[in-house]
Amino acid sequence: MTEPTPGSGGLHELASEPNWKNAPHPVLSVDAAGVVAHANDVARLMLPVRPGEPLTEPRWLARAHAEAANGPVRGVAGARIFEACRTAADSGGHTVWWLSDVTEAQRLADRLAVERARALVLREASNELLSSLNLERCMEVTARLAARHLADAALVIMPKFGRRHPVTYCGPDGVAVREYLAVDTAALPGLAEALRGFPPVPSRWIDPAAAPGWVARRELGEAGAIVVIALPGHGVPAGALVLVRRRASCGFDDDGPGPAEDLEPAGGGGGFTEDEEAFARLFAARAGAAISAAGLYAEQASITDTLMRELLPPKTQRLDGVELAARYRPSGSRERIGGDFYDLHPAAEPEGEALVVLGDVCGKGLEAAVLTGKIRNTLQAVLPMADDHQRVLGILNEVLLNTDTTRYVTLALASVRRQGPQVWLRLTSAGHPPPLIIRVGGEVEAAATRGSLIGALDKVTSVTDTVVLEPGDTCLLYTDGITEARGGPLGEELFGEARLRRELAGCGGMPPEAVVERVHMLASQWAGAGFHDDMATIAITAPRRVHLSAVGGHGRGRFTA
């Protein structure tokens, strides 16, 4: 006789059939009053049911029968998970329940749900960790994600910095806290080894009750399990990850398992399974790589910032009673240094000359800035002979010719000395635009100086001009980034020296800060969003002895000396 399938009808008659008794899965019939009428051998073996007794266990099946559930229902009986299908009642009012063992299917479904959840965790970790190269943010993200998905609390511990360890802690509230703690690594088994990159000890070897207070914190309650994992970095360990679970009872009741909503296993004590520890190491590998990259970036950024400070132009200052203002703008909006530079060197003696240097290295960006630093160091070394411009330029030319570079530099030197109300300047241009003299009355003239490029020829030739600034007069040193700014109405016209002179004619008597600001503003507006080279300017002004009148800034005023 062929065994009928559920729902084929007439199943109440099968209770007396020998083949029905030998079915490989539990089958039982229940009357309208909820009493078990028949049950095969498998049902009596695997389920707490007896013919002639009310169906009370398992509760999920009894509830489904009482509620006349139509669809399949699922629940736990003993150590197994069953799915029960109901057939229509026969003429005697008996309902037959066919049960299938779905324990393995449920296990695979739960495993798939866990793996999907873990994949989402790793994707979230990758997205958040790779979105920043900030070391502190990477530590916070690691602690927060670990506390959310792997444990009740997590700590990211970095190698010792000075006498303390940087630690980021995140508890059940999801708030990451940065701390600097005097950590005794020997107090937590496996921590010292993890910070050196060794494999972790199993969590069962760590006694949560003996953990120090900075690990098992008061807000967690009683710690149930602790695992310590190394954060592998690029060549060296990036730190350690400590996961803490509070003591809790986990598991299913006989109402059946729910969906795999988190990564915690069923079991008592909140412990870590080997599978969870393996996943935690996988998470730690990604976090460690991100933290290591962020740490390397922070170290390189610190080194770069230190070197950059040596390459940045100095702050302007008042040189021996002479007013000074300088402005520098690199070609790129994201750059801080480039090929243009200036330096200010006060006089070594009370009646000596101060030296102002403005230069332009061929090219732009970091490579030009490195050569700029070498030139500035050389000029610093030859300051004792700065009164001889020709000699200074000759020494600098020899240095560049003996350097493994094809770049050259243009320079403008200005030796500055104040004599009473006047300022005396000795100006030398070496391949550089000659300085412009702006008189109080608005006249603009170029200094009579010229010279050859530095680092291009075997010998440097130059002509030095002496200029006297009366009170309110200004000498402007500038690089060709000003005059060669390309833009205008058609977008391709150079700003040019003629236009610069016309604009400077309206700057007579202005303070030096206003002069350099106006020059940069005009050149920048002319270039607009188009390309421009590095721009640098220095304004040297003889201090005024009278207040400007309200008419044009040139009139007679009250004596204030």
Image (tube, grey):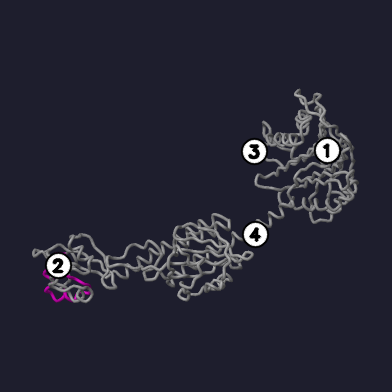
- Alpha carbon distance from label 3 to label 1: 28 Å
Residue behind mark 3: 529
- Alpha carbon distance from label 2 to label 4: 75 Å
In this orientation, which residue lies closer to the viewer: 306 or 448?
306
Residue lying at 45% horizontally and 58% vertically, measured from the top left: 173
Residue 58 seen in the current view = yes
Name the residue at the left extreme. Answer: 92
In this orientation, which residue lies closer to the viewer: 227 or 37?
227
Q: Label for residue 30?
A: 2
Amino acid of disc 1? Pro
Amino acid of disc 2? Val
The mark that comes first in sequence, 4 or 3, is: 4
Q: Label for residue 434?
A: 1
The mark that comes first in sequence, 2 or 4, is: 2
- Alpha carbon distance from label 4 to label 3: 34 Å
Q: Is residue 70 left or right of residue 539?
A: left
Residue 298, above or below 241: above
**Which part of the image, by quadrant, shows the C terminus?**
top right
Amino acid of disc 3? Ala
